[in-house]
Image (tube, helix red, strand yellow):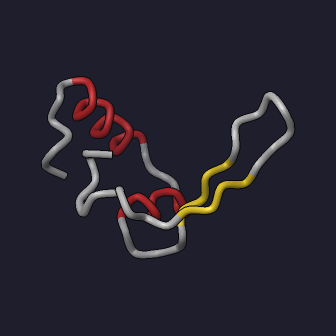
Amino acid sequence: MPVYSPGTTNLKTNAHTRPVGRRPYIELEPTDHPLAVEQRTGIGLDRVREIAEAVLHGDGEGR
């Protein structure tokens, strides 16, 4: 995900399967990477807007 620095390519994850028809739950290893922290603690509306703006306007490289 280009809105995160450092990148997310090699983050360790656990994939939890669910019943047929439900998406698996992807859990990041608990680290201090910003994406892992946000997954554990949640994000506010301002951060959601920041991510959406970066994705929608192609400005995802700088975070």
Toward the right, the furthest residue is 19
Q: Is residue 44 left or right of residue 52?
A: right
What residue appears at the point 55 percent right and 62 percent down from the top-left corner? 13
8 in relation to 12, above or below:
above
Q: Is residue 26 left or right of residue 16?
A: left
Toward the bottom, the furthest residue is 31
51 in relation to 27, above or below:
above
Q: Is residue 21 left or right of residue 7?
A: right
- Residue 49, quarter of the rendered image: top left
Toward the top, the furthest residue is 56
What residue appears at the point 43 percent right and 64 percent down from the top-left corner? 11
The location of residue 37, given as percent across then percent down, is: 45, 65
36 in relation to 2, above or below:
below
Considering depth in this image, is 10 or 48 the residue closer to the camera?
10
The location of residue 43, given as percent across then percent down, is: 45, 50
What residue appears at the point 18 percent right and 25 percent down from the top-left corner? 57
The location of residue 45, given as percent across then percent down, is: 41, 40
33 in relation to 61, above or below:
below
- Residue 59, quarter of the rendered image: top left
The location of residue 26, given as percent across then percent down, is: 61, 52
Considering depth in this image, is 9 or 61 the residue closer to the camera?
9
What residue appears at the point 38 percent right and 39 percent down from the top-left corner? 48
Q: Is residue 17 left or right of residue 25?
A: right
